[in-house]
Image: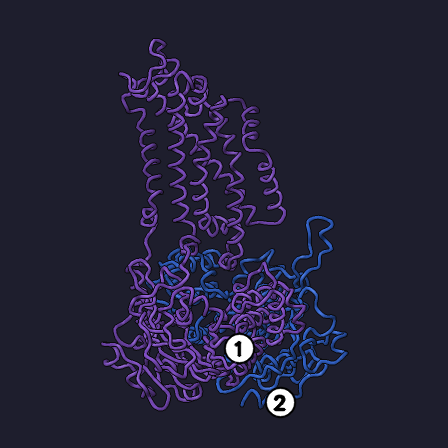
């Protein structure tokens, strides 16, 4: 429990990820937009207090004065009314109408969307077909028709604009609601005895609010434009009331003799709407969960490598290895925090050999695999040190074209989820053939022939026919075979398989494991196999590296490690896995949680959960030391059990 | 033998096939559960095992009344669940509760742990406010969570801690039966062990009955008294756990056991022929497992074998079952 407390307090301290305000202020354009909108709003609110001329007081003697004349900073219009005063009063009306219309449209539209999305079936159909009918009319015509029916006037224009914009809210809110209704917490609320109405308002609505706010911020500018448009046509604000649109309309007739009468309100509309849109974009970027996770920020084509990791290997240091990792360290820099995802990973794999990397989630096993060919996304990833030696070359120092040649060529990857690895728009045969074409320069026809051969080599029945299938037409096991066939396409020296069977059912997993085992022997390829499952390791691997909190804690031959684990973590992890065939034997859980890798203790990271830890374990790092033949362990009390 | 608390009789569920317009009615529906009979006795743990798409989660949702069967019935201590769902919903929720698979998505990100745990106390038990506070503290203690976590939001917790909250929420209603849908499959092994031990401990202390759904045979063997194996919407074998793991009678159960990679034992992928899982929307006429079964003969492909009694309390749906004790060597070697 101490580890939990430490971790929780660490999280409380600071999350490392910047807050909403910090993220908004990083977007300079949004800050400009915020400045414009805030300035306009302050001016609009203060208008009645400012020492301005009466906006409706006509003075025909002083008509059409140019800007910057005495007493009229922005000149006067055709009736001699002060332009500055009319602009400010007009902006006040435009902003108010736009804002109220937005709120009305948001309320009604969101209500329709949330009810339609939540109840579904016939109610959804009825409501959304009604919304579709609203959208089937050109919006301006619809607004005109509504105003024509209700009569001209600002309030009616407001209603017209609100109604026209209801579909935008209804549609986006319905979409989000549908995805939320399927989440388990809605079912959980049902199990807790909540009725539909309570679920709608207390479970779903709070999670929909960000979408409503985003839609509001992006439609507000639009609404102000539409208000101006209706007023311009004389259907909104009625004379003598000032409104930006009607001022523009009045000035249109004087465009040649007195251009300032139309230009000034036009400019004000332009600046106001640009300001609102910039701010709206900023708000969307901050609130949209996909953007928040950084999923849309484009990573570079290869991981950034620190100069410390660029040195060339000494000759013949790893002469008989197909691939060797030497003190590889990769970190992630997010906000002010540095996450040490992997530290000092060293191992090598010989041709035809299989090395397993096993560990729990967050132990750094996938980051290790991705670092080999610079596939860790940057930002935030950085390879901080070490070497990846392939054919006496440090791949970390290699330029991008060289890496791209190796990727999918001599070193191939097989990932966990074949459905996301394969492109849904091309047939599987096309995708294998493309890999062959790119690396071997074969003709299209030969490449296709080779693709079919490869599919046969991974035991796909009716390979020639299946080559014309799209990924969704194949089962999970078949798809993973296709990915393996792609990995084999260029006769790789090394295959890195990252949890290749985790998404598969056990019966299919057994077949895929058998296939991988057979292929590495046949092609004499080195296999690096990443998994969280000890059973799978013992099934296929020769050597194993056990990882914990970014470090290898123990390595050796699979049989030796599993028969006599040296590190307390390995020993305890093995005793807390239920083993088939052992009946109802009690399992001994490991208390606590792994440490957060941005807040590691100075000494052994497992010490707080360890049953043989002593005071000597915590003050300084413990190094990986040889222990018997071919084995290494990062522990000062290897192989000991609690008394 | 204890009384039966939860019972499913020829339970069926199909999806789709119901269009709004007249010409949409001919669409073929997908039968997720195809006539399942199950009985759960008081105090026992029934494991339901199967691979993805076998209908085990759909079955679980019907058992607790989260989804309505399209055929057959579920009875809770003899009362029809569909009827209770309409007329006595809160009584139904008080008697049977559910633990979800994904510990994070089953907690509303905008609610605190206190709000999540108080919901069933308020809505189902009508507990007054001060009593609710006490009870929340008790529940936190019951699942080994620190009391000061109670005002935090779900994103501040790890997967294991979130699952403890999910279990506490289910326990809040003081149910007799808990249906657990893959409660540990999203967790890491060291955390999984903590949750399994907690579940075992709670069951003993509170006298609960569990229906435990999982794809992990080792976990089921560790926790369950009886086991039902599902394949493509059917129960193909149902027996006491010891019996089913020591000597499976259905070739599918045998293949499943042989496929699990285990320390120090090579799995045997040849327990299956290379066939494919049939399309659940168009299942074969006979035994659904026949296309992958090394023992299948012609009559297997013609009619679906019924679930028959093989030995005392051991049911299997197979015309050519494995001999008793046949799996013994393999699973103990």
Which x, y percent locates residue A575? Answer: 42, 82
Query: In the figure, B75 relative to A281: above or below?
Result: below
Which x, y percent locates residue A594? Answer: 35, 72
Q: Which mark is residue B220?
A: 1
Examine the image and state in which quarter residue B1 appears: bottom right
> Label 1 to label 2, Cα distance in Å?
20 Å
The shade of chain A is purple
Nearer-the-camera pick, A533 or B166: A533
Instruction: Assess whether mark 2 and mark 1 are in contact (beta carbons under 8 angstroms).
Output: no
Residue A568: tell me if it is visible.
no
Q: For the point 54% across and 51% down, which residue is it?
A: A178
Nearer-the-camera pick, B289 or B104: B289
Nearer-the-camera pick, A249 or A606: A249
Which x, y percent locates residue A48? Answer: 31, 24
Residue B171: tell me if it is visible.
yes
Identify residue for label 2: B325
In which chain is the residue bearing label 1?
Answer: B
* Count of numbered marks: 2
Q: Which mark is residue A495?
A: none
**Quarter holding the N terminus of chain A?**
bottom left
Examine the image and state in which quarter residue A332 appears: bottom left
Nearer-the-camera pick, A324 or A253: A324
Q: Which chain is blue?
A: B
In which chain is the residue bearing label 2?
Answer: B
**Quarter holding the C terminus of chain A?**
bottom left
Q: Residue furthest top?
A: A61
Q: Residues within 10 Å of mark 1 (few under 14, many from 20)?
A: many
Q: For the point 73% across and 50% down, which residue is it?
A: B23
């Amino acid at each position: 429990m101490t580890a939990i407390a430490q971790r929780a307090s660490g999280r409380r301290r600071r999350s490392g990820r910047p807050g909403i305000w910090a993220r908004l202020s990083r977007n300079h354009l949004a800050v400009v937009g915020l400045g414009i909108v805030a300035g306009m709003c302050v001016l609009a609110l203060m208008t009645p207090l400012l020492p301005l001329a009466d906006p409706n007081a006509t003075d025909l003697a002083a008509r059409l004065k140019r800007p910057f004349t005495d007493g009229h900073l922005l000149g006067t219009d055709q009736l001699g009314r002060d332009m500055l005063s009319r602009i400010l009063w007009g902006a006040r009306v435009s902003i108010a109408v736009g804002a109220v219309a937005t709120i009305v449209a948001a309320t009604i539209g969101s209500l329709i969307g949330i009810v339609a999305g939540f109840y579904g079936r016939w109610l959804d159909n009825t409501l959304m077909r009604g919304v579709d009918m609203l959208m089937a009319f050109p919006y301006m015509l619809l607004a005109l028709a509504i105003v024509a029916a209700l009569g001209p006037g600002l309030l009616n224009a407001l209603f017209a604009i609100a109604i026209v914009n209801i579909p935008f809210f209804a549609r986006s809110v319905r979409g989000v609601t549908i995805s939320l209704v399927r989440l388990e917490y809605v079912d959980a609320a049902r199990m807790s005895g909540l009725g539909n109405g309570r679920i709608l308002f207390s479970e779903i609505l709070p999670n929909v609010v960000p979408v409503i706010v985003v839609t509001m911020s992006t439609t507000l500018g639009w609404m102000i434009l539409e208000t101006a448009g209706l007023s311009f046509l004389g259907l909104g604000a009625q004379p003598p009331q000032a409104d930006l649109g009607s001022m523009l309309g009045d000035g249109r007739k004087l465009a040649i003799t007195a251009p300032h009468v139309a230009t000034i309100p036009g400019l004000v509309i332009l600046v106001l709407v640009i300001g609102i849109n910039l701010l709206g974009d900023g708000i969307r970027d901050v609130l949209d969960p996909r953007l928040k996770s950084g999923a849309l920020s484009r990573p570079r084509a290869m991981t950034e490598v620190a100069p410390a990791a660029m040195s060339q290997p000494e000759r013949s240091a790893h002469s008989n290895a197909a691939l060797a990792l030497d003190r590889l360290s990769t970190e992630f820099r997010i906000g002010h925090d540095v996450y040490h995802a992997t530290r000092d990973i060293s191992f090598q794999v010989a041709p035809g050999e299989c090395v397993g990397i096993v560990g729990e989630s967050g132990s750094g096993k996938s980051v290790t695999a991705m670092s080999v060919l610079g596939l860790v996304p940057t930002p935030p990833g950085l390879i901080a040190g070490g070497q990846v030696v392939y054919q006496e070359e440090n791949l970390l120092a290699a330029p991008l074209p060289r890496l791209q040649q190796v990727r999918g060529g001599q070193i191939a990857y097989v990932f966990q989820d074949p459905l996301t690895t394969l492109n849904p728009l091309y047939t599987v045969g096309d995708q294998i053939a493309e890999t062959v074409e790119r690396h071997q320069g074969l003709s299209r026809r030969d490449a296709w022939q080779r693709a079919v051969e490869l599919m046969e080599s991974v035991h796909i029945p009716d390979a020639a026919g299946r080559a014309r299938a799209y990924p969704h037409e194949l089962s999970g096991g078949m798809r993973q075979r296709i990915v393996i066939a792609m990995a084999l396409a260029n006769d790789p020296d090394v295959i890195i398989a990252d949890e290749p069977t985790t998404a598969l059912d056990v019966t299919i997993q057994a077949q895929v494991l058998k296939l991988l085992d057979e292929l590495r022997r046949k092609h004499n390829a080195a296999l690096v196999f990443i998994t969280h499952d000890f059973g799978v390791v013992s099934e296929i691997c020769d050597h194993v590296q056990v990882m914990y909190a970014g470090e290898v804690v123990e390595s050796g031959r699979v049989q030796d490690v599993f028969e006599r684990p040296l590190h307390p973590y390995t020993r305890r992890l093995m005793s807390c896995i239920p083993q088939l065939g052992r009946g109802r034997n009690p399992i001994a859980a490991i208390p606590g949680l792994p440490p957060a890798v941005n807040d590691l203790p100075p000494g052994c990271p497992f010490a707080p959960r360890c049953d043989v830890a002593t005071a000597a374990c915590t003050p300084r790092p413990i190094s990986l030391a040889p222990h018997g033949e071919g084995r290494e362990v990062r522990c000062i009390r290897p192989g000991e059990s609690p008394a | 033998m204890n009384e039966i608390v939860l019972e499913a009789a020829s339970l069926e569920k199909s999806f789709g096939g119901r269009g709004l317009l007249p010409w949409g009615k001919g669409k073929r529906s997908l039968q997720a559960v195809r006539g399942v009979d199950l009985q759960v006795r008081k105090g026992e743990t029934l494991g339901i095992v199967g691979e993805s798409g076998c209908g085990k989660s759909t079955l679980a949702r019907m058992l607790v009344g989260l989804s309505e069967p399209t055929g057959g019935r579920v009875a809770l201590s003899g009362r029809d669940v569909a009827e209770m769902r309409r007329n006595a919903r809160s009584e139904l929720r008080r008697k049977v509760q559910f633990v979800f698979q994904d510990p994070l998505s089953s907690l509303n990100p905008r609610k605190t742990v206190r709000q999540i745990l108080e919901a069933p106390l308020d809505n189902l038990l009508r507990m007054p406010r001060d009593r609710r506070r006490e009870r929340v503290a008790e529940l936190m203690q019951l699942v080994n969570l620190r009391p000061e976590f109670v005002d935090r939001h779900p994103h501040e917790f790890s997967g294991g801690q979130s699952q403890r909250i999910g279990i506490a929420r289910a326990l809040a209603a003081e149910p007799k039966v808990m249906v657990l849908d893959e409660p540990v499959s999203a967790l890491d092994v060291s955390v999984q062990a903590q949750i399994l031990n907690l579940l075992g401990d709670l069951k003993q202390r509170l006298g609960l009955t569990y229906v435990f759904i999982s794809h992990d045979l080792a976990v089921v063997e560790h926790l369950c008294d009886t086991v039902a194996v599902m394949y493509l919407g059917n129960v193909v074998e149902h027996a006491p756990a010891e019996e089913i793991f020591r000597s499976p009678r259905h070739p599918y159960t045998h293949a499943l056991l042989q496929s699990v990679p285990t320390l120090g034992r090579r799995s045997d992928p040849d327990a299956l022929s290379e066939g494919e899982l049939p399309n659940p929307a168009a299942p074969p006429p006979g035994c659904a497992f026949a296309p992958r079964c090394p023992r299948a003969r012609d009559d297997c492909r013609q009619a679906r074998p019924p679930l028959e009694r093989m030995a005392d309390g051991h049911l299997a749906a197979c015309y050519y079952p494995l001999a008793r004790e046949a799996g013994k060597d393999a699973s103990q070697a």
